[in-house]
Amino acid sequence: MTPPMRLVDPFARAITYLRVSVTDRCDFRCVYCMSEHMEFLPKKELLTLEELDRLCSAFIGLGVKKLRITGGEPLVRKGIMTFFRAMARHLDRGALEELTLTTNGSQLGRFARDLADCGVRRVNVSLDTLQAGKFARITRWGRLAQVMEGIEAATAAGLAVKINTVALRGVNDDEIHDLAAWCGRRGFDLTFIEVMPMGDLGNEDRLEQYYSLKDLRRDLETRWTLADTTERTGGPARYVRVAETGGRIGFITPLTHNFCESCNRVRLTCTGQLFMCLGQEDEADLRAPLRAHPGDDAPLTAAITAAIARKPKGHDFDYSRQTVSGQVSRHMSHTGG
Ligand code: SAM
Ligand code: SF4
């Protein structure tokens, strides 16, 4: 019997985690992610739902065990539940261990139940503030009440919720205790993320808003007792346990802490480009072999394997000299966060 195929990169890291952006569109315009008047890709550039299915299935055939669906806002993609239902078959047969998504939460009221029916067990909801006015300023087009309803719907459907918060100095640094208390009460994990220099959104602002998680953690410790844990959830976050709430807080620190050595992931854009590293420009076009050979996955599999052989050791983001270097020009909504 031939052993199952695995994807292993040049640094002996097994690639078992695929993040897939299913759309570049979004119903919000978060200031650190998109400009107000974004131009989105023409529809024909996007992978169809069938193509997304074929591509993800090819990765699962190559040993990917965890699939995270993201965007843009994944739940605004038309017909997205068809895709989730298609992926559920890989969960059912045990080839896939986890199907999950990162969402702004706005559409969870509509879809939480269906997602749970498709085998989704956890959702990451991005939420930077608990204040309605501030929420509207950060997301430009979002309404906090709708996201809160979405979170309720997710909880009611039995989904575990993790809150992702981008730490922004002068914006939400006054709310870290409220967020910790709220998540602790609700039983939600909370993960803080450092703002990253993505896209062409004016990085002077990003630099000014940069709130290192080292500082954030120290600030949290003025109120909470944090104990380091060795827990990892397969991602780059490092976790602490909060003694007062029993909750967990994670820190994703791409800029102050290098987590690349344990990287097990690659990212697929909604146009079928595979990025082997979030912080590097190198990519592989998987849409061409996919479209050129509709009935034959061998060229696609070969393209995936060749791309993984080029996965770099790590990224080069650095704010340390008070300038943003290692910046990449694409938007988070394109690569899928
Ligand atoms: N729309 C979904 C959402 O907001 O969760 C999924 C896509 S969004 C691009 C994924 C994650 O990237 C979100 O948690 C968002 O806060 C984060 N993000 C976007 N731009 C960022 C930036 N410049 N730095 C750090 N995180 C960013
Ligand atoms: Fe949309 Fe998510 Fe980007 Fe906000 S962070 S604009 S919700 S894709």
Image (cartoon, rainbow, N blue to C red):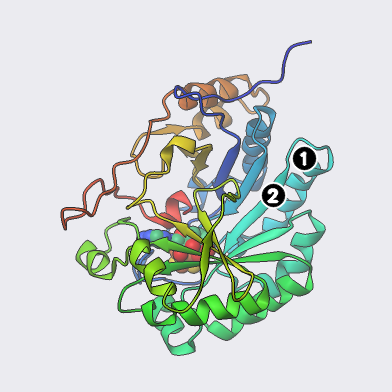
Q: Amino acid at mark 2?
A: Leu
In the structure shown, which secondary structural element does the residue marked by tag 1 occupy?
Answer: helix
Q: Where's residue 156, x and y in %?
A: 78, 74
Residue 259 horizontal side relative to residue 52, left or right:
left
Tell which residue pokes out farthest to the bottom in this image.
133
Inspect the image, locate mark 1, and give the three-letter code of the amino acid beneath it: His
Name the residue rendered at 29%, 42% in the picture. Answer: 316
Q: Quadrant of residue 282?
A: top left
Residue nearest the viewer, comparing 5 with 183:
183
Residue at image mark 2? 99
**Element type where label 2 sits in the image:** strand
Out of 198 and 16, give the one closest to the viewer.
16
Quadrant of the snapshot with the N terminus:
top right
Q: Is residue 86 left or right of residue 56?
A: right
User: Left of 318 or right of it: where is 27?
Assistant: right
Q: Ligand 1 near label 1 (Cβ, under 8 Å)? A: no
Of callouts 2 and 1, the N-terminal one:
1
The label shown at residue 90 is 1
Give how far across and how far down residue 211 sits, in percent. Answer: 32, 67
Q: What is the tally of numbered marks visible in this picture?
A: 2
Label pair 2/1, CB-CB below 8 angstroms: yes
| Picture coordinates of residue 159, whole percent (x, y) | 74, 65
Callout 1: few (<14), some (14-19), or many (20+) C-alpha neighbours within 10 Å? some
**Residue under the point 37% across and 65% down:** 34
